[in-house]
Image (cartoon, helix red, strand yellow):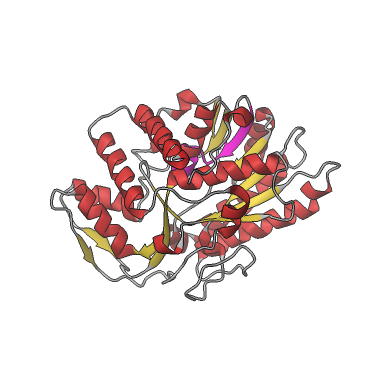
Amino acid sequence: MSHPVPDASFWRGRRVFLTGHTGFVGGWTALWLKQLGAEVYGFALPPPTDPSFFAATRLAERIAGSTIGDIREREPLAKAAAAAKPSIVLHLAAQPLVRAAFHDPVATFATNVMGTAHLLDAVRDLQGLSTAVVFTTDKVYRNLNWPWPYREGDALGADEPYSGSKSGAELVTEAFRNSYFARHETPVPVVTVRAGNIIGGGDWAEDRIVPDAVRAFAAKQPLIIRNPKAVRPWQHVLDAVRGLLLIAERTAAKKLPAEIQSWNLGPGDAETTPVSDLVEHLVRDWGEGARWEHRGDNAVKEAHFLTLDSHQAARHLGWKPVWHVAGAVRHSVAWYRGFLAGDDMAKASLAEIDRHIADVAS
């Protein structure tokens, strides 16, 4: 069964202001938008890692504009947003790591909460804006460790600073939507996207399973796992980005129910698996004696069970992941293998997008 992909006729020539374009998900989003013909204007800190997807794909040379700046600083952000004259705003800039948030909660709240406020304040009066999409996380829900998926109407909550900061970003978005964007003569829809655990080539962040595995396996060391029984909604970055772009496209075109203000993007129940299953796929695909070890670490409270109900996206967008866990890991490992071999990763990443589109259509 085929599913929709972003429409090049919609995106061609469309001006997009994208925060977080130097990061992992933001980088893949920028590259896909560029392939669709959009004019992408990015605003973000320098790449958070070295190596990075941003550098490996030479994104700065490919998109219409790349401004290095901090969303915690309102004026530079507002200036860049105004100069971009966007039709669509995609807010992906964030402090995205649970353990980093635990060790530096104030900086995390400053980025994820006040950064979102700065962004929405900067664009709320821009002429020609058709929609804004704020990218959050599956961890915004009040996690009761129950065995069924969370739906968009379930209560938000926080057990640690990262989830608290992202729940705060959701509330900031709601407040700005109701106070400003909804009161325009022609209301501008502002929605949030809550995505499950995202994996894929080009992520080099510390304390994430796939990049940690790549570093360990390349060094002939075992991958250390804290909580192998933790269950998460794993999905490939291109499945998440496809959903994000479809939501932005259909929201801007007024093709979605106006009352929908938040979207879950996650895999089906069969693809929500323990950490140990994901790691076993990594070990098999990497080969060369790759292995992992369990070393418990309870320094940071993390949910044991977390999964999303994405029926809303399936019903209204026709969206569902097409690269399930095994395929997502296989494509991820191939990307890192290519990088380590010195391949042209811009060409390889564009080919990856083409393969994904073909698989969606098949």
Q: Is residue 19 magenta?
A: yes
The residue drawn where x is 41% and y is 72% is 304
Q: Is residue 290 magenta?
A: no
Residue 262 vs residue 44: left or right? Answer: right
Residue 134 % position (x, y): 61, 49
Specify the quadrant that holds the C terminus: top left
Check the image and name the residue furthest to the right: 185
Check the image and name the residue furthest to the front: 1
The residue drawn where x is 43% and y is 70% is 305
The answer, for residue 88, to whether it is visible in the render is yes
The residue drawn where x is 57% and y is 48% is 318
Q: State whether residue 39 is above or below residue 121.
A: above
Q: Nearer the viewer, residue 325 or 63?
A: 325
Q: How many marks?
A: 0
Q: State whether residue 115 is above or below residue 62.
A: below
Residue 88 % position (x, y): 66, 37
The residue drawn where x is 63% and y is 36% is 76
Residue 37 vs residue 188: left or right? Answer: left
Range of magenta residues:
14-27
Q: State whether residue 337 is above or below residue 196.
A: above
The answer, for residue 92, to whether it is visible in the render is no
Residue 127 vs residue 60: left or right? Answer: right
Q: Nearer the viewer, residue 48 or 245?
A: 245
Residue 180 % position (x, y): 79, 49
Residue 205 % position (x, y): 37, 49
